[in-house]
Image: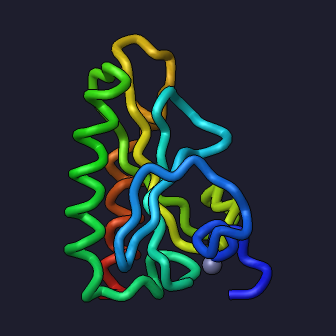
Amino acid sequence: MNGCVFCNIIKGEIPCKKIYEDNDFFCFMDIKPISKGHVLVVPKKHCENILDFPTEASKRLVEITKKLATIVVKAVGADGFNVGMNNGKAAGQAVFHAHLHIIPRFDNDGLSSWPGKDVTEEELNFIKDKIVTFL
Ligand SMILES: [Zn+2]
């Protein structure tokens, strides 16, 4: 897609630190890494987020993520990793071409999304009941 940074990276018009490429996916180092070894798994075909990512490509996405996470963890000596995807500006998505983050984690690295907030059982029930009405 014209004007898309990731499409331009995939076309080779913008340099990147590529670590893997096949017919459908392109993987490179995040230029603003959250941790050492933070990489992005990007489908070559432009789609904005997980909602328009083709379901039939999901198996390959998981396979590549597992393969790369295993390699990255070994390469940087990580103790674990997070897999994340930001969907929408409010969720922190900065490039609107779907991509998945592999973020190596190290014991006591200070990064934290968990534990989450404390909520009451009533709050949990309220949200749960609201969500299931949309199923
Ligand atoms: Zn794109």
Q: Going by the image, does 83 lie left or right of 98?
A: left
Q: Quadrant of residue 114?
A: top left
Q: Going by the image, does 61 lie left or right of 8?
A: left
The vertical placement of 23 against 100, above or below, is below
For the N terminus, the quadrant is: bottom right
Q: Position of residue 24 (x, y in %)?
A: 37, 78
Numbered disc total: 0
Q: Residue furthest top?
A: 108
Q: As rendered, which of 77 and 103 lies closer to the eye?
A: 77
Q: In the image, what residue occupies the spot 42% across and 83% down?
A: 53
Q: In the image, what residue occupies the spot 44% across and 49% down?
A: 19
Q: Position of residue 49 (x, y in %)?
A: 52, 76
Q: In the image, what residue occupies the spot 39% across and 43% down?
A: 120
The vertical placement of 45 against 83, above or below, is below
Where's ligand 1: which quadrant?
A: bottom right
Q: Going by the image, does 128 lie left or right of 16?
A: left
For the C terminus, the quadrant is: bottom left
